[in-house]
């Protein structure tokens, strides 16, 4: 699809506060960047122009792809469906291990961007017959205004909106950005403040607060992904602590995904995550009481399959990002009738059993 919408280069930012003559604070994420005239925020795409904050990323995606929804990864939200995916340049985290750094660490004027209005994105989803749109690749928090406008239109057209995010967002701004979102996969980078501080230039508690809010104050379907990096966040103690926190604060029905790291960006000295590390993390989660836990970036059909937590029947068998078989009856196990947490067809609501 050729998009011809005429969009301005700068879009007024919704989350900003003047702090002095010509200086403004961005209140979108917990960095609260204080920007003088002409300065860009940490994310590269929010800029002070003449004392006002603007988004440089609005309407400027770096490209689109039609993916299986399992690639996000979301295993309990319309499994087997396709999703229109896109991102922009920039990011509000500084992950030294970023697996998509060519986009997240790029400035908007250094990458080839398209010119797409929210209406263009909706028409693209319709044209590709995708029931959902994913804001992904970099962190969509930084183009929150664009997310709101697209997801609002998508809701009107009965198209789902999905956020794939690190969850590093101000507690007030997230109410706006997530207002029309149907599902989210939050990248919980690790379960230690030292990891967040040293390897992401962010803070753990802000992400935990977002997870708590998503689970208890919204009806957004939630799944969590952790990239296990050898020697950094892959210890048995840390994995157990994370699972215990999830169980106590989010419940046993939130799917967890443990994925394998490959050397990239500023951590090319690290080795690939051994398969046994990923499989052991899954076993630790299941043993702790997490009902649904999956593996990623490795080939393991058992670790990618959805099992009934009551009778252990195979319900949805996956091969990498493809669904090889789905035996569910609506949202239930056909053998024992157990309700499985999630949204399994376009007519159902998000289900999180008590």
Image (cartoon, helix red, strand yellow):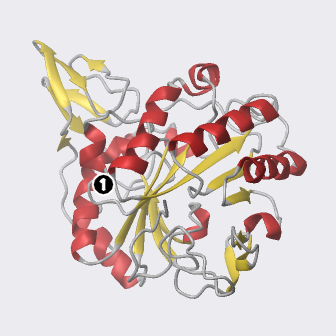
Report whether 228 appears left or right of 105.
right
Is residue 29 in view from this perspective? yes
Residue at 45% across / 45% down in the picture?
139
Q: Secondary structure at mark 1?
A: helix
Vertical arrangement, residue 195 with respect to residue 108, above or below: above
Residue at 23% across / 22% down in the picture?
25
Q: Nearer the viewer, residue 164 or 257?
A: 257
Residue 162: quadrant of the picture: bottom left
Residue 73: quadrant of the picture: bottom right
Measuring from the top left, give residue 150's x and y in whole percent: 27, 62
Residue at 64% across / 24% down in the picture?
195
Image quadrant containing the N terminus: bottom left
Q: Residue pushed farthest left? A: 21
Q: Nearer the viewer, residue 311 or 87?
A: 311
Measuring from the top left, give residue 44's x and y in whole percent: 38, 33
Measuring from the top left, give residue 317's x and y in whole percent: 73, 78
Is residue 101 in view from this perspective? no
Q: Residue pushed farthest top? A: 20
Pointer 1 residue: 147
Report whether 317 appears left or right of 212.
right
Residue 269: quadrant of the picture: top right
């Amino acid at each position: 699809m050729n998009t011809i919408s005429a969009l301005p280069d700068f879009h007024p930012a919704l989350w900003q506060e003047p702090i002095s003559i010509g200086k403004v604070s961005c209140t979108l994420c917990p960095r609260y960047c204080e920007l003088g005239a002409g300065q860009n925020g940490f994310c590269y795409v929010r800029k002070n122009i003449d004392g006002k904050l603007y988004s440089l990323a609005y309407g400027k995606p770096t490209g689109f792809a039609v993916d299986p929804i399992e690639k996000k990864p979301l295993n309990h939200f319309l499994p087997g469906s396709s999703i229109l995916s896109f991102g922009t340049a920039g990011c509000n985290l500084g992950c030294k291990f970023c697996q998509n750094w060519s986009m997240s660490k790029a400035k908007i004027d250094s990458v080839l961007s398209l010119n797409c209005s929210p209406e263009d994105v909706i028409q693209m989803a319709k044209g590709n017959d995708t029931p959902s749109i994913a804001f992904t690749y970099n962190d969509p928090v930084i183009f929150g205004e664009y997310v709101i406008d697209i997801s609002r239109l998508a809701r009107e057209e009965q198209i789902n909106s999905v956020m794939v995010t690190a969850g590093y967002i101000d507690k007030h701004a997230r109410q706006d950005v997530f207002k029309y979102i149907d599902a989210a996969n939050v990248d919980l980078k690790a379960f230690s403040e030292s990891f967040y501080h040293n390897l992401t230039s962010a803070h753990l508690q802000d992400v935990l607060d977002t997870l708590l809010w998503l689970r208890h104050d919204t009806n957004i379907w939630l799944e969590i992904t952790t990239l296990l990096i050898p020697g950094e966040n892959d210890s048995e103690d840390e994995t157990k602590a994370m699972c215990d926190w999830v169980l106590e604060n989010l419940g046993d029905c939130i799917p967890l995904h443990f994925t394998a790291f490959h050397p990239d960006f500023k951590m090319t000295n690290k080795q690939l995550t051994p398969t046994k590390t990923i499989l052991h993390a899954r076993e630790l989660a299941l043993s702790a009481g997490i009902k649904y836990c999956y593996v990623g970036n490795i080939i393991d059909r058992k670790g990618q399959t959805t099992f009934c937590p009551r009778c252990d029947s195979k319900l949805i068998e996956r091969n990498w990002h493809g669904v090889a078989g789905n035996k569910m009856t609506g949202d239930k196990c056909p053998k024992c009738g157990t309700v499985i947490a999630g949204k399994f067809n376009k007519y159902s609501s998000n289900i999180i059993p008590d």
